[in-house]
Amino acid sequence: MRVYSGIQPTGRKHLGNYLGAIRHYVTGQEEARAAGDEAIFCVVDLHATTVAYDPAELRDRTYDTVAILLAAGLDPAASILYRQGDVPEVPELTWLLTAVTAHGDLNRMHQFKEKSAQQRELVSAGLFLYPVLMAADVLAFRADRVPVGDDQRQHIELMRDIALRFNARFGGDGEPREILRVPEGVYPTVAARIMDLQAPERKMSTSSGSIEGTLYLLDDAKTTEKKLKRAVTDSENPPRIVRGPEKAGVSNLIDILAATTDRTPDEVEASLADARGYGDLKVAAADAVNATLAPLRERYAELRGDEAAIEEALAVGAEKARAIAQPVLAEVREAMGVGPRG
């Protein structure tokens, strides 16, 4: 049971990234180890080049992201952690997979529509092909499970379609053999989408959110508390700490508190039935978020300054990753008739 996850190195990582993905990486690492396999984690620097970016900042953010993953509990000795640009088999597989990827499918991707609308000078072909690169990331390693945020469901479904189409076309006559494994997406059941504290109708985001509405992982405790105390709720009087479509801000705070205390939203609501108002909910959420992130923040401060050690860990991870991807790519090339006969 092989687990695969990729994470963008762009932007400052926030609570939504942590609750929706990063903490599940650690769980996946332990599940894979218990099953006698390895979990694979990638910092996807090639994906980051599909929109306008600063090269020096990309490298710094990559180091930031790796340090955060290590601080959260990823263990390079127990899993594979690598940088996407260090494994050339993946971009080659991306090109080969375009042979079984429909233009119409890519044109329907919600993320492409959203991101292309934000580009002022150039909408790159790389942005359009982003989902194929994401598919290659996973399919190159024959991963079984892919933990992702709820907003990545469409990409996972396309990834599965690409694998099925490839096997059907190149897997031989009769019952096609599984050259590419068809992975399953794994989605968080609680806090699948953490919303902006100031605009709770939209997802918390580094690129499109507000600074006051975004809880960055590396914010200090006082800043975290300040942002949560200023979070938008509603004007209902008397205040009701319950979830509902008309109570987006309150629902978001309940979800945050539930996810950071390993409870269900119903349990959080019940625990605050006698609360004096929304202030009690905000204080409880701030205390829970700070308690959850304190170990990560402390460990990050220890790790980030040693970039040589980070590079060494990434080099080891890339070697392990290539050892898995190379035979998969060789089988794909052979099936497609590309290059010399195997």
Image (cartoon, helix red, strand yellow):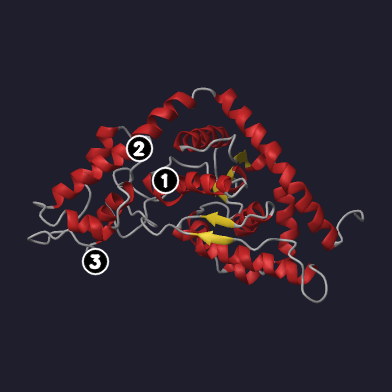
Residue for badge 1: 18
In the image, 317 versus 119, the foreground residue is 317
The 10 Å Cα crowd at callout 2, few under 14, some 14 to 19, many 20 or more, is: some
Three-letter amino acid code of the residue under disc 1: Tyr
Q: Which mark is residue 244?
A: 3
Whether residue 293 sits left or right of residue 91 in the image: it is: left
Q: Which is closer to the viewer, label 2 or label 3?
A: 2
Numbered circles on residues, count:
3
Residue 306: percent from left, percent from top: 53, 22
Mark 1, secondary structure of its residue: helix
Compared to 74, does 252 lie above or below? below
Mark 3, secondary structure of its residue: loop
The 10 Å Cα crowd at callout 1, few under 14, some 14 to 19, many 20 or more, is: many
Look at 28% across and 33% down and name the residue there: 221
Look at 12% across and 62% down and name the residue there: 236
Look at 30% across and 47% down and name the residue there: 261
- Check contact, mark 2 vs mark 1: CB within 8 A: yes
The 10 Å Cα crowd at callout 3, few under 14, some 14 to 19, many 20 or more, is: few
Would residue 116 be seen by someone viewing this image from the given angle? yes
Mark pair 2, 3: CA separation: 27 Å
Look at 75% across and 58% down and name the residue there: 96
Three-letter amino acid code of the residue under disc 3: Gly
Which badge, 2 or 1, comes first in the chain's sequence?
1
Residue for badge 2: 293
Residue 187: percent from left, percent from top: 46, 59
Would residue 88 be seen by someone viewing this image from the given angle? no
Quadrant (top left/top right/bottom left/bottom right) for the C terminus: bottom right
Three-letter amino acid code of the residue under disc 2: Leu
Which badge, 3 or 1, comes first in the chain's sequence?
1
Mark pair 2, 1: CA separation: 9 Å
